[in-house]
Amino acid sequence: MIEKLNWDAVPIEEVTPAMHRKIIAGEKMMIAKMKFKDGFRVPLHSHENEQITHVISGTIRFWFGDDKSQEMDLNPGDIIVIPPNLPHEALMIGDVEEIDHWAPPRQDWSDGTDHYLRK
């Protein structure tokens, strides 16, 4: 049976005081609506999941590759597709709200083993 959802009804998870997220997962895809405080840094990491990031407010500065040789700023309305297994790091410039999609769903986010974010 198909279920209608609304972001207002999805519980907020406080990953850290500077990162909050709401997650909805299906069988083959996951979506997360997130808010970050200015200066929050997502450390260099990679994952098997294809990722699509859509910035709603603020700016996210990304670095791509093991050597972080490619740098890119995403501003409100910008969207990026990050291929599976591509190392990337991100810095929040200003308070940021964004939505990420992953396929397949992030197992580490579902089971709480996403320790790289909780430092």
Image (spheres, rainbow, N blue to C red):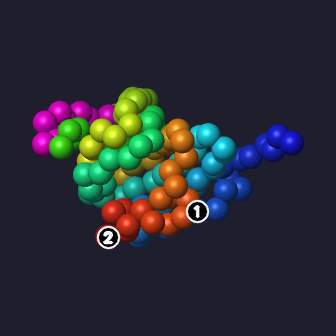
For residue 25: magenta?
no
Range shown magenta: 67-74
Three-letter code for the amino acid on which mark 1 is drawn: Ile
Residue nearest the observer in this picture, 90 or 45:
45
The picture places residue 9, in percent across and down from the top left corner, at 71, 56
Mark 1 crowdedness (10 Å alpha carbons): few <14, some 14-19, many ≥20: some
Instruction: Identify the element where label 2 is drawn.
Output: loop
The CA span between labels 2 and 1 is 19 Å
The reply, left or right, for residue 90 in relation to residue 49 is left
The reply, left or right, for residue 19 in relation to residue 87 is right
Mark 2 crowdedness (10 Å alpha carbons): few <14, some 14-19, many ≥20: few
Decide: is 103 above or below 42.
Answer: above
From the image, tell me which residue sits under label 2: 119
The picture places residue 4, in percent across and down from the top left corner, at 79, 43
What residue is drawn where x is 67% and y is 56%?
10
Three-letter code for the amino acid on which mark 2 is drawn: Lys
What residue is drawn where x is 82% and y is 40%?
2
For residue 68: magenta?
yes
The picture places residue 24, in percent across and down from the top left corner, at 63, 49
What residue is drawn where x is 38% and y is 47%?
47
Instruction: Identify the element where label 1 is drawn.
Output: loop
Q: Main secondary structure of the magenta part?
A: strand
Q: Name the mark on residue 12.
A: 1
Q: Name the mark on residue 46.
A: none
